[in-house]
Image (cartoon, grey):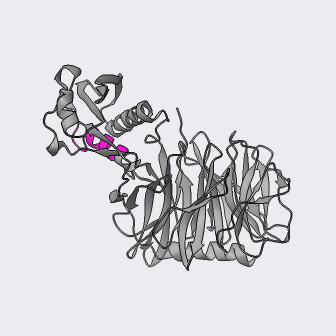
Amino acid sequence: MGFFRLLVATALLILASASANAELLIRITEGADSALPIAVVPFAENGQIPPGDKVSTIVQSDLNMSGEFRTLPPSKMLSLPSKREEVFFRDWKMLGQRYVLVGDLSRSADKVTARYELFDVNREERILGERAAAPATNMRSLAHHISDKVYEAITGVQGAFSTKLAYVTLDSFNGKPRYRLQVSDVDGKRARIRLESEEPILSPAWSPDGRQLAYVSFETGKPVIFLHELSSGKRTKIADFPGLNSAPAWSDDGRSLLMTLSKDGNAEIYRMDLQSRQVTKVTNHWAIDTEASWDHTGKGLFFTSDRSGGPQIYHMDRPGAEPRRITFGSRYNARPRPDNEGKYVYYVHQREGAFHIARTNLNTGEETVLTRTQSDESPSVSPNGRMLIYATKQGNDSVLTVISADGGAAYSLPASEGGVREPAWGPLVK
């Protein structure tokens, strides 16, 4: 069981080096040369619009975070139009902009309505025009919705800015460690603590409907898997077998979980039916098999195994089938996370003593190292497959970093105080 213990010990040691957490921040660290220039003009305001971050500012930050866009600072804009008649395309062409987003906000009672239009500057035509409304107390959700619509109108891919993040932080209270499982917006704002414990919390995993989290808690003195209903706070212990209970991963239909158990002596991957709580062994090998995740078909799975002498990524076409080794580029490749199209699998990759995030093209076998940081772990792919979040070190702090799926742009989300680990990107939900 040495390999699995090494994974757990490494996670705990790094997490234990973190300190306090409040809200996550966002900080640009690297831009993409191929990013599309877009001007998000500050929205005109009619009525008493709530104070705080402006809708247009949130939209700017969202689009920048994707790595696919580069927004124009309002200070460099020649005018501030809010509707089609006020847009002079020659001005935006002169500024080198490919797209321009304009709009206004109006308030009626407790509701704010946004009217917004997106224009293709080169073609001088409108490609998106909509209205959207939200309670005056929920302006951030309105902004994320607009970001999603703009992103989809330009790329043809559904935006993921209205999704959620789960992550774990650690501080000290009365001389004892305090682990916190938190859920926030994708930009780290509106963080809420969902669980506090003096014992480690690991491997949060979202249900497909975004209503539950599965995770590993050591609160009983050993690793146990819990289900946590976010709306009610109800927690259910679902895997408390002798030995290890770890690495939960949901099926697409939400009816079962993959998990690693060592109840029979060796760490193997099992599948649990959540209604009956019956478990079925998926792997059966003398080596350590762990960290399973379903592939894009929902029928096959990726997992980490040291059956070749060191941790590598393997794929099964179906549970129980003969596994195929995927990674060969180094002696350590672990924690696989596939995209939603079956093109890539992302994972932690060791090279020259440093841990990076890498991906392998499943069609060609080509491996690409995506990150330049040195102590990277816990990759999680956005539900639209276009972004990736992972944990790393930035100076003495542990931070989350968002990169484009090709590694071309990076944004860090450090905690306002101390460090943060174990990110899990939530699903797209209606």
Q: Is residue 203 above or below residue 63?
A: below
Between residue 44 and residue 119, name the one nearer to us. 119
Query: Is 51 in the magenta?
Result: yes
Determine the main secondary structure of the stretch shown in magenta. Answer: helix
Q: Seen in the image, is 360 located left or right of residue 231? A: right
The reply to whether residue 239 is in sight is no
**Numbered circles on residues, count:** 0
Q: Can residue 401 be spotted in the picture?
A: yes
Q: x and y percent of residue 293 in the render?
A: 68, 53
Q: Is residue 62 above or below residue 264?
A: above
Residue drawn at 36 percent across, 33 percent down:
146
Asked if residue 360 lies in the magenta stretch, the reply is no
- Where is residue 350 shown, x and y percent of the image? 59, 73
Tell me the quadrant of the picture where the N terminus can be found.
Answer: bottom right
Position of 181 compared to 269: left or right? left
Specify the segment rendered in magenta: 50-63
Q: Please say if 411 is above or below 210.
A: below
Furthest residue toward top: 85
Viewer-side residue, 375 vs 344: 344
In the image, residue 99 sits, relative to residue 36, either above or below, namely above
Q: Quarter of the image holding residue 352?
A: bottom right
Q: Residue at x 21, y 34 (%)?
A: 92
Image location of residue 340, percent across then percent down: 61, 44
Residue 336, percent across and down? 64, 59
